[in-house]
Image: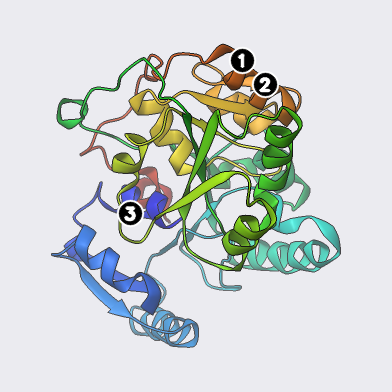
Amino acid sequence: MFWYSVDKIKTIDYDKHIILCSKHVDKILREQMPDSNIKTVSKFGAVAIIIYNYLFFNGSFKLITFTSHPLPFLSNQTIAFYDTYPFLGKLGLLKKMLFKIAVNTSKCRIGIINRSLSVPFLNQCGVKSDKIFFDSAFPTVKMSKLKSRSTTPRTPLQVGLVGTDSSKKNYDTIFNAVLELSAQEKVEFIIYGTNNDYYRRLCVDYKNIKISLISSDNIEILDYFYQIDYLISAAKDEGYGRPMGLAAVVGVPMMLLKSDVFMEFFGETATFFDEVSDIVAFIVNHRPPAFVRPRAVEHFRGDESAFFSSDYFG
C-alpha cells in the first residue's frame, strides 16, 4: 500500500497537506516527495496528532489513510480497502468485528482497489454504497522514458517473483514444480524484496535452484523489470498488487493463477493457469516472448485522485 499511496498523493498539491509516516518509510518518502510536509511519528503519535487536529479544527479536519484501519467515531475520514485477506481465519473474525465498529461509527468513505471481493465484503459489514468509491489502481508511467524490452527471453530464463513478506507468496510450490520437471538449469529466479527469514529459508531448502534477491529498498521496481523475462505468482489469496499493475502497464509478461481479483485487473494482459505446475511447465517448454502489449492507462498524472476530492466530504 505504500507505493499505492505515493501514486495517489502525487496527484495533489501534497506540500499543502501534512503527511504522517513511520520511521521505516521516512527516507524513501522524502525522496519521492521532497517538497512535502512530512512528520515522522509512531502509531500513538499519529493518533495524538489526528485527535488534536480534529479538536482544533472543530471536526473539519480531513483524514485520508491508505489502510483499512479507520479511527472509530471520527468523521471526515477516507480509507483505502486493499483486499479481504487480513480478515480470513480466526484472528480475521476479530479484525472484521473491529473493522465493522470503526467504519460504522466513523461513517468513513472507502476507496476500493478491486470490486469483485471488496464490495460484497463491505456490504456484509453494513457499509452503504454511497460511501464506497473506486479509484484506478494502475499507476501512471511516462512511457517515453522507458527502455525497450527484448521479446527474446534469456537462457536460462530469468523469472521474477515479487515480495518476501510472508509464506503466503507460496514460492515453495513454484520451486517444487521446477524440481519435478528437472528444470533447475533452465530457470533462474530473481526475487524483488528484502533479505529476511523467509528468503533465507528458501535459499537453504532449495539449494539446487538458482535464487537471487534484488533489494526493494535500493532498486526501483521499473529497473528490476529489465532484469526479468516474466513475472509469475503462486498466490490466490492476494489482492491487486502495485508491482503487477506496473508490469501490466510496461509490458512485462505475467503468468498468474486464476482468481477473481487477478482476472478483474489483469484479464487483458496476463496468462492464467489452474495450477502452479502448469505455469512452470509453460515457461520452460514454450519460452514465450518476454514482452506483451502494455495495458492502456486510463488516467493521467495531474488528475486529482478521488481519495482527496472535496466533493465527497460533508
Distance of label 2 from label 3 (alpha carbons): 37 Å
Q: Secondary structure at mark 3?
A: helix
- Closer to the camera: disc 3 or disc 1? 1
Q: Secondary structure at mark 1?
A: helix
Q: Tag on residue 281? A: 2
Q: Tag on residue 167? A: none
Residue drawn at 15 percent across, 64 percent down: 34
The residue that mark 1 highlights is: 285
Residue drawn at 37 percent across, 79 percent down: 23
Rendered image quadrant of residue 274: top right
Rendered image quadrant of residue 201: bottom right
Q: How is the image coloured?
A: rainbow
Q: Tag on residue 6? A: 3
Residue 41's place in the image compared with 253, above or below, is below
Q: Is residue 309 visible to the viewer in this orientation of the structure? A: no
Instruction: Measuring from the top left, give residue 145's x and y in whole percent.
Output: 15, 31
- What is the three-letter code of the residue carrying label 3? Val
